[in-house]
Image: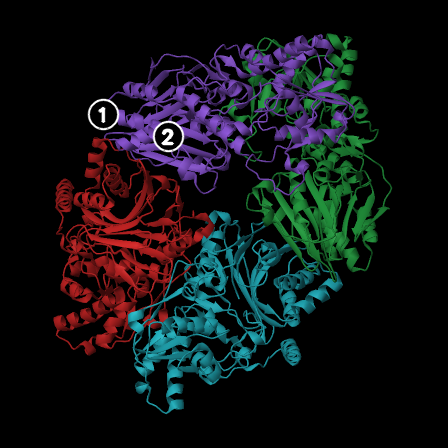
Chain colours: A green, B purple, C cyan, D red
Amino acid sequence: MCGIIGVWKNEIGVKNTLYYGLIELQHRGQEANGVAVFDGINFNLVKYKGLVTEKKLEDYPEGILGIGHLRYSTIGKKEILIDRFAQPSILYTVKNGLSLCHNGNIVNYSELEEELKRKGNLFQTDADHEVILHILAEELKNNKTLEEAVNTCMNKLEGAYSVIGITGNNELFAFRDRYGIHPLVYGMNENSFIIASETPALIKNNVRKYFSVKPGELIIIKDWSIKKKQIVKATPKQCMFEFVYFSRPDSVIDGKSVREARFNLGKNMALEYSLKNRIEPKSIDYDFISPVPDTSRTAAEGINEITGLPIREALIKNRYIPRTFIMPKDRSKAVKSKLSIMKDVIFNKKILFVDDSIVRGNTSKTIIEMVKEAKPKKIGLWITCPKIIAPCYYGIDMRNYNEFVAFEKNVEEIKEYIGVDELFYASRDCLKKSLGLEDICESCLTNKYFTPLAKEKAKEQMKWLNAVKKII
Amino acid sequence: MCGIIGVWKNEIGVKNTLYYGLIELQHRGQEANGVAVFDGINFNLVKYKGLVTEKKLEDYPEGILGIGHLRYSTIGKKEILIDRFAQPSILYTVKNGLSLCHNGNIVNYSELEEELKRKGNLFQTDADHEVILHILAEELKNNKTLEEAVNTCMNKLEGAYSVIGITGNNELFAFRDRYGIHPLVYGMNENSFIIASETPALIKNNVRKYFSVKPGELIIIKDWSIKKKQIVKATPKQCMFEFVYFSRPDSVIDGKSVREARFNLGKNMALEYSLKNRIEPKSIDYDFISPVPDTSRTAAEGINEITGLPIREALIKNRYIPRTFIMPKDRSKAVKSKLSIMKDVIFNKKILFVDDSIVRGNTSKTIIEMVKEAKPKKIGLWITCPKIIAPCYYGIDMRNYNEFVAFEKNVEEIKEYIGVDELFYASRDCLKKSLGLEDICESCLTNKYFTPLAKEKAKEQMKWLNAVKKII
Amino acid sequence: MCGIIGVWKNEIGVKNTLYYGLIELQHRGQEANGVAVFDGINFNLVKYKGLVTEKKLEDYPEGILGIGHLRYSTIGKKEILIDRFAQPSILYTVKNGLSLCHNGNIVNYSELEEELKRKGNLFQTDADHEVILHILAEELKNNKTLEEAVNTCMNKLEGAYSVIGITGNNELFAFRDRYGIHPLVYGMNENSFIIASETPALIKNNVRKYFSVKPGELIIIKDWSIKKKQIVKATPKQCMFEFVYFSRPDSVIDGKSVREARFNLGKNMALEYSLKNRIEPKSIDYDFISPVPDTSRTAAEGINEITGLPIREALIKNRYIPRTFIMPKDRSKAVKSKLSIMKDVIFNKKILFVDDSIVRGNTSKTIIEMVKEAKPKKIGLWITCPKIIAPCYYGIDMRNYNEFVAFEKNVEEIKEYIGVDELFYASRDCLKKSLGLEDICESCLTNKYFTPLAKEKAKEQMKWLNAVKKII
Amino acid sequence: MCGIIGVWKNEIGVKNTLYYGLIELQHRGQEANGVAVFDGINFNLVKYKGLVTEKKLEDYPEGILGIGHLRYSTIGKKEILIDRFAQPSILYTVKNGLSLCHNGNIVNYSELEEELKRKGNLFQTDADHEVILHILAEELKNNKTLEEAVNTCMNKLEGAYSVIGITGNNELFAFRDRYGIHPLVYGMNENSFIIASETPALIKNNVRKYFSVKPGELIIIKDWSIKKKQIVKATPKQCMFEFVYFSRPDSVIDGKSVREARFNLGKNMALEYSLKNRIEPKSIDYDFISPVPDTSRTAAEGINEITGLPIREALIKNRYIPRTFIMPKDRSKAVKSKLSIMKDVIFNKKILFVDDSIVRGNTSKTIIEMVKEAKPKKIGLWITCPKIIAPCYYGIDMRNYNEFVAFEKNVEEIKEYIGVDELFYASRDCLKKSLGLEDICESCLTNKYFTPLAKEKAKEQMKWLNAVKKII
């Protein structure tokens, strides 16, 4: 996952918008931030480690067009190797330069990279945006239009990609894979045009009205005009994890409010639970709901809507521990966690915890251990995301079957592992109904992939896993 | 306001506890952090700007005794002047050294400082902990015991002080003013003794059972023994703002849970409102309660308890903007704020916002302006802290009568100023009942001070203000 | 000008050699340092601003092959734009990667870059090493051998280039333009093979015996073997400025000691002066010689050898002002300079200053002004480099005709400008004799260029200058 | 050793002078730099690690009076402990504050500190300037004048001290011990008054005419007036090491040029050598003189003056290795050194090396080892400072008898140890004659001390050493 932004302005001065816009997208990536601008003559590029607010506005270059990127990924962690992975990158073709960054994951990245290399293309990073950059640049130097170039590109790429780019021809452009897996929105204020991963980056820059780049669509901004073109047919499959966990609650993805989706999740889970347990929603046997901060607060509100169970927060988060701060390994579990418990809320109570998702299960397990020290009467745990059982090849950092607690454990076993009295997952139906979307990307829930290479890769991973199992 | 910690350990190695303890107290001060340790031979001292997590464990000195301090105060803001204000300080007397830091405010600081200077004492900082340091050191070098020294000290100091110190005689000690204005707690784990501003710093360091240093009490830890002594008679007057705003909700102050106090505040406000408006609590005319993040969430839960109004969060905070990050002046109001609104929650709804307190009123005004853009039907605002109308001389950063929006405005006028449809403050009775304390420090609410010099200073400020008014 | 180094080692661990080697080459470039290594699987790259000693050994990546680069150039000065200009760069081709850095200047850089772009190559920097990288990578992916690739490359490149590179095929290689304009040396110690710009980087890494990469030669190190191949016919034209100013005095370039060259320059200038002025060397009318620190000390020794005039240093340099430290513009001339004068040495004396070269003349002028404050009786100035009148297209940062004080001023006029009583330049004959080289690159002295494009560019610059002159 | 500066200005703006002045004094201390200013109302203080040029002008506070300090000392090396040792310090007395810094060493520091502590004074650092600060502040608060206070102070202090201070009463003052051990000079430019350790700090700040603070003298600058007062009788004993090694060659100490002193040393050594060896100065059997850079260049010129032996530099220094850069221990001797040799100068030659002094002998030994690799015919080594055999209690960092190579070795033995063919020290007579001073501080040469406590301490050290020897 990453956050991206692009700005066109009718005069010099995009860095302010880039800087404050990236701050609004910071939740999408905290490891590195990079900005490429075109100042009418030159492209300039900077890449920094850490949070945007650790740098000053002056540390960014100025231009008339610019793009920015926040890096999240966990590969290439070695502190010193920012040049090998961070975005954006720039390529200079015969007449013009081109720079772009993307959010997502190209499934056939290695295949395309090898093909390009065989054809003679020369690469500079180990990051997948460079494949997109090369394909586009190849087309452009062959005198193709940007539209034609993007067409070629979209027909080659398999996977999830929300791309924002700029050219030395004064164009700002953006396109999104045919599935619209990750969000990409745009809008205007009085003197500039802004494209970003999420709507808050637009709103904080005074954009009143915003739109989505449609799945399969390309938009090009040049001078004061905007050109939109449906490049490939859209077959929407938005990433359900953007709604469930990743995006900000005040974001609107393809016209759907993230906040509303989460609220609905809470409501529908409560209804589903009642139905399943043949019990009136108002009679569900808990004293209160306690969201695991911060994401699941809205779902808790939805549960409250149906069940009437009050919300009482039993956990609090230390706001001053940055995501990248490493707690030493030898310290007690309690200290390892960035959460604290409120003992008097917990003691002798039947508590329904709500969390957005369980991946490995470690965090949940630790939280429950902490909670138990305060002697609750009963602990329930509702998870708004159905069981994650398969890797994501489309941009979420979940890579291997055997890292999921739900991979070969059933709900009963997970319940035991985590140590709660009751564990309840939202169903896939519940999820879809809550998002109000029929076709979502839920491969990590189903282990079924809708693109050919992803299918194949999943099969291979599984085969290998089985082989390993036999040996051990 | 500041955060303080002190550690005694039965072997070398206090810095770990100091470091992770200070992280838990970070909300009490973000401008600077300082640590003084005694390693059996030497005292060592470091002071750094910014957050504790910006430094590594290795940046702190190691010792067998140590104290740490987090600075909050807003005077001496000039970045480069850390040496003039930050704590702790060390003094070396004839046989031993002495280092201490404190949380609070010495009302007669200038008077004592001048007296000491006249007697010949020489000062090194502009911070009030140095007066305490000098008084103690003076007594110690005259062969007084630490008890006698603290006795002299407490009889001289007027104001609020929670003090933690160490001596070259291998003692860790702490004492608290007779009013117990600010909190001070302690406890043990398997190999160390820890004193801190708030209980979470103890708990994260594996302290299971904790106690308060009582108002007027001194505790001394040496070797494996702890000595407690009531130095002056306790006349408790705990700072109500610690409960209302400043402390963490998982803190326990003098046996009272901060979380519970806030929850009670919500409950009692709801009851008071019903009574005042002769309306059933369940009939209060709002669609939902929305806490202003993060402090007022617990009060919102209390209101929910009585009124049944659901909690629906309409505001969210950007977690990645550090408190010290300066937003540029020329940016629009919306961007200036670290908050965002959730439009679909607000639209056409009757919303009851809850906030902990109003000081200047600017923040509330800006939030309400942002909220109105999303067209709510009705906006109410409940404030859990009664009207603040007078300066604090006991350690909260509220200094002048004319900075308070409530100073010469009645509730109706403040309502107009902020732009809400209804504004309701908790009463002082409500506050006391909620805290479960009869005698609290509420001078900022009453303009009545319980120490002589504070009385006088308030009178003088008021006189001057009136004089100014006549001229203008 | 730049400094470069390359290391092959029979086990992991090149970074130590790279780091300490670059420190020995620091005089060749202080603006940025970069290192690329291959660890057997991946290439890793870092680039930093400033001096090598500002970074720790740990800040460099580790590998079994590596190259390092020190950047000197003055374009792209904007602090934040390190990514646009600094070296090395890496390209990944079909099977392997390739990384290289170079010292020199490719005259037909723009032409080759455009040709490559037209063919479809995509560029990532504005630095000329990337053209070399592309040409080589293109050949390699077409299954050419490294030898064949370098052959193609050398036949395309016009200009000065000393190149060091590494491949993912575990090769360390280096080649030097047919003129051998800038130095490139190599040698072995017990477990590694090292190539560098200058011999001190070898010697400090325990290399006892060293060799030059010959003009037009390629060397390839793989496993324990070294392969040498004369790719193009050598027509040596070593840069005289390397001897006169740029290289360290303890360097040996193509078997010629820099120290000896400078010493000879002093000797031959003294003889030339005597002859020209029909005066015995021992009767030259000065009290003493004073070198302008630090480069011209050796030449002063040479003058002393012939004339017997003693060396008395009248100028000293502040060692603690880094090259990149910017003195404020509004300070007096005396402070602007990093030099100080020794008044009692100067007063009432006839002083013969020796300096290596005059480019703009500003520094000399300022020094002489400072010296005059101490009231000398007579000031002479001998310059060991003949009059610089034309731009360098081969790697020295002298770009425009009109920046040279000697461009349209004769010696008499320069003397007046600088303010000395006597000004004497070494002749070109003197220079050649001193270096012991018949064919040197002295285009900046003659305005005659030995490569076609340089000729053309010089002509165009001159034409433009004349056009401008007519207008003004 | 340290460097100090003080500035009075007739308007706000001393930081510029402090900053650029300290840069000129940087050779006197590279570990830390500190500045205290008075802005008419407040004192402000900053202390930084490292070189002045690592900080920007903006990092210093501004004022109308200010002092600056460069720390050299090697105690308290632990990086993080700047607060415990660095200068200046500030004390606030009843009406005013006082800040000062000093260069030198107070022999009875511990005794005075204990006396003060017993009297009740409280200390904040482990640095000896604080004793001076306390004594002065004590007197001032007792309504003594600054003159009277300094009088008391000078009668108490034993040792070497050049002090510069400022008061909240708008005074800049300076005083120097009765022996004038370390230098202290002052002068004016058009709008300010400057006091500093050495003259270059004045000259670079446009001071044309400068004076010495006389041994035993106090000067006070206030408004536009300067008051001078001989506080105690002067008995000059200037530190010979300031002339021989520590000060810049362009400094003038008490009217004596450092450059001239070193030149004389060279001359007189040559004469002494001739006499001793009954040989004509022009027949001394060496091919040339090679100074060990950078200090001994001037002495080499003096030797040349008498012997006619030419100067040929065989050693060069890497300018880019900062003094504080730590070379790793496991690297070969050659790399450990910051020096390089010029092989072709050395081979088969009889070389007379000149160095300023030998303390431990390690550096000389390493240099000679390096030189021998280039196979010289004969190596001589002349040392301009007589044999150092005893500790310095007056401010030079030489503390223990057994650290000196000359402590129990005679010249013959030292010669063997270092590995030269001939070793010749300047005699003490030669030294005095060269400095043109009859009474110098040469206790480190004679093991005779002229102050009572130093005598005693030396005796005790020696006694202890003998005791240890018996045991071993």
* Quadrant showing the C terminus of chain C: bottom right
Q: Mark 1 falls within which chain?
A: B
Name the kind of residue labelled 2 in the image. Ser
Q: Is residue A470 visible?
A: no
Name the kind of residue labelled 1 in the image. Asn
Q: As rendered, which of A312 and B190 lies closer to the eye?
A: A312
Badge 1 marks a residue whose secondary structure is: loop
Residue D461 higher or lower than A363, as above or below: below
Residue D56 higher or lower than B191, as above or below: below
Mark 2 and mark 1: span between their CA atoms?
24 Å
Residue B406 higher or lower than D312, as above or below: above
According to the picture, the residue beneath numbered tag 1 turns out to be: B142
Q: As rendered, which of A257 and B466 lies closer to the eye?
A: B466
Residue A359: x and y in percent read 66, 27
Residue C77: x and y in percent read 57, 59
Q: Is residue B167 visible?
A: yes
Kindly report which numbered mark, 2 or 1, lies closer to the viewer in this rendering. Answer: 2
According to the picture, the residue beneath numbered tag 2 turns out to be: B110
The answer to whether residue A380 is left or right of residue C208 is: right
Residue D211: x and y in percent read 26, 60
Please tell me how crowded label 1 is: few (under 14), some (14-19), or many (20+) other residues with Cα within 10 Å.
Answer: some
Instruction: Pick whichever of labels 2 and 1 is earlier in the sequence.
Output: 2
The answer to whether residue B82 is left or right of residue B39 is: right
Q: Which mark is residue B5?
A: none
Q: Mark 2 falls within which chain?
A: B
**Picture quadrant of residue B67:** top left
**Picture quadrant of residue A453:** top right
Q: As rendered, which of D234 and D95 lies closer to the eye?
A: D95
Badge 2 marks a residue whose secondary structure is: helix
Please tell me how crowded label 2 is: few (under 14), some (14-19), or many (20+) other residues with Cα within 10 Å.
Answer: few
Q: As rendered, which of C208 and C73 lies closer to the eye?
A: C73
